[in-house]
Image: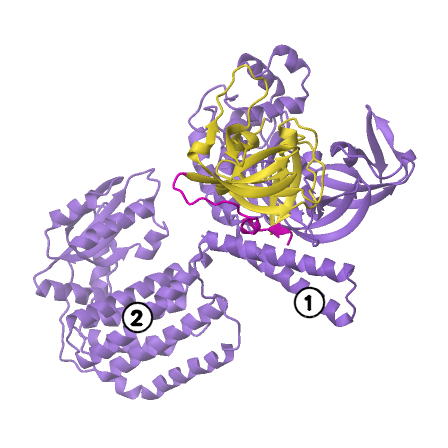
Chain colours: A purple, B yellow
Amino acid sequence: MDVNQYLEIFLDETKEHLESLNTQLLKLEQEPEDVDTINEIFRAAHSLKGMAGTMGYKRMQALTHDMENVFSEIRNGSMKVNSNLIDTLFQCLDALEEYTSNIQETADEGTNDNQQLINQLNEFLKSEGNAAPADEKPAESKEEVVDEAAEKWKDIKVGEPERHVFTTAKSQGKNVYGLTVYVQEGCLLKAARAFLVYKAVEEKAEIIVCNPSAQDIEDEKFELDFSLLVISEHSLDEILQAARSVSEIEKVIGAVYEFEAVVIDESKPVQTLETKPAAASQAQSAPAKTNDKKAAGKPVVNRTVRVDIEKLDVLMNLVSELIIAKNSLVSASNTEGVTGSGFNEQIEYLESVTTNLHESVMKVRMVPIESVVSKFPRMIRDLSKKLNKKMELYMSGEETELDRTVVDEIGDPLMHLLRNAADHGLESSELRIQRGKPEVGSVYLDAYQDGNNVVIEVRDDGNGIDVNAVREKAIERGVITAEQADNMTEKDIINLLFHAGFSTAKQISDVSGRGVGLDVVKSKIESLSGEVEVRSKLGEGSTWTIRLPLTLAIIQALMVTVGGEKYAISLGSIQTIEDVNPSDIKLVQNSEVISLRGSVIPIIRLSKELDIESSKSPDDNLIVVIVKKGEKLAGLVIDELMGQQEIVIKSLGKYISKCRIISGATILGDGEVALILDANALI
Amino acid sequence: MDELRVSDIKASEVKMEGDTVQYIVIKLGNEQYGIDIKYINNIVRMQHITRVPKVASYLKGVINLRGEVIPVMSIRLKMDLPEDEITKATRIIILKLEQHGTIGVMVDEVKEVVTLGVDEVEKVSYDGKEEKPTFISGVGKHDNELISLLDLNAVVVEK
């Protein structure tokens, strides 16, 4: 899992905890015995450690770990607070602050181990723990005695500090228990279950040792069991009850934990520290230096603000208005013959500012599709088990960015297509081997930008679509008649899959095949002004291609005239512009084509499509704009080229929505409205 | 801009009674029609209309109204009258209707604003024999002249 998305939260919370630690430590120095303060400090240090561990900042974790040990000693009363200790702890806080600022600037904690500080902390601990030096051995020998494998808590290696804790607890009349929790086999969210158990136990008892570590449990780095050593005032039964209340837990066993008591000598003074001030000041100066060096660097993480998407829409509209106003200025300066190069310079400057402004506003709205697709590998793994087919998902282009509103909507259609690929597309393992294909089926999810579109492809190397089966099914379902079917191309028949209430799965499975699916996918994508297309080869697999507009509001367009009317064509779909002699136009199956650099391209006369007389005579050379839609090319015949312009897309409104080849309108610099041709619909 | 404010039009005989409705009187050919003023957003002079291909003939196209693209229709064509002749008096009345949004209608001339009391309006009873759809919701009497009051939803609704 990529933790970068949590970086900001981490930084915010870390700063909060450090602040609280600072104030609480000061308070502790004033009132060394205040239990609430100590508890507060312990909690903050513990959270810091956990957070640093989760984010993978090992050095930070190590330092906070040792600090936590010290705090825990203080809390248990086995260590006295003195000003030396407080000084060292403040230095630790400074070091943590240094880590934090490093992380903010470079996303890395830096290389300073702060070993001196850790050593100092350990000196403090040692000076307290000296009283029980020989405890390690007996504990280990005990492991060999353990004969019942289930009671794994007995295997936990217990260090001195823990034994201190146990001893103190016992002396306070609390009980020390060992617990081993077994999670059910096949439990899906082991970590979550374990966490719930952990939480449940924590309510009744204080968890001193956890094996594997709480961190490993959170990361699912454990088999089916984990063990805890806890101290509690409650009875063992109560704790076991709490742990067992979590579902998908096989069993929880526990007993009173036997340990070698430690003799606590509280009167033992802290001596070793007196020799350390020099080292401490050294440690302090080192971080200061590195701070100076990095201050100039640009912070990696900026402060963020959550903004309502509606506010962004308003901003976007204002930018659109600005661009229209700018275009008016440009055309006014051209027609009214404003002289002086200064004016033109300023216009150009304004132009670059508005373009940048537009791009920034668009970028604010763009998010990578990663947030949607990151859940798919897990889904495919589950499907693989459920369907008993071996399959692997390969993804690329997760970083491709799309407008926020589109990303939010695209998840479901993609999930449908992936499920389809897994369920209908891929053959069973046996069949694959029989057909000489690799046993493990492959499903691909590729996203990439193509001109002004973003293309997302879902591909599988499975069976492909059986056109005959689809045809029969369609006739059987009454979607088409047998006569109609005879006249349909393979492509038309495959497109029937998008027809509402159509499902070819012979067995209705749990995964897909309830007849809701592809038609929903299609309407969803069309509502995002996108398109979905399928190509398939029987026996080799199918490819579903989703094409979505990258920008929803402002595009670069080529302005052309047809029969005296102005039209805009999105620059993103234009390949080239060609000058074609009328004699080069050939007829193939009664439609006009040209041969261009080896490929045959159909010609679309826009004057005919737009019901208007071309202003050019038939003998003149034709200006042909070659547009591209996926793999397909087409040549649009226009009358005149006007030039390139940044245009703001305006909707034609509900009232005029029937015109398929017009995707919208824009307002030109002179206030006139020009229509935007949808090249995709023309092809 | 090429706009006229509603208030600029000479408001003759504005009655201050309770149950009255204000209408803008327009001319189509020789007939006078009234449009309920509450639906009128704006009245603009004739300007270049961008034709939209492949739509019903009565839809003349779209215009730019202060940065918004607004469709414009011809009432004449919708009512099967001869096509509009664009003159200096031709205006586009911008209507704001709940169901259809903002839409412009072309009229030959905008004459005045009149205020009609309920008693001055006669409801038109629907005659089932009539072939043409009716666009009139009632007839108002004003200064010995008859004003046909337009049923805007019927005018605007798509055929």
Q: Residues within 10 Å of mark 2 (few under 14, many from 20)?
A: many
Secondary structure state at the residue bearing disc 1 = helix
Residue picked out by circle 2: A66
Q: Residues within 10 Å of mark 1 (few under 14, many from 20)?
A: few
Q: Position of residue A623 (x, y in %)?
A: 84, 42
Magenta segment:
B1-19
- Chain assignment, label 2: A
Secondary structure state at the residue bearing disc 2 = helix
- Chain assignment, label 1: A
Q: Position of residue A373 (x, y in %)?
A: 50, 44
- Which secondary structure type mostly characterizes the magenta part of the structure? loop
The residue lying furthest to the front in this view is: B144
Above or below, A262 against B19 in this view is below
Specify the quadrant of the image occupied by residue B33. Answer: top right
Above or below, B78 against A45 in this view is above
Is residue A109 in view from this perspective?
Answer: no
The label on residue A20 is: none
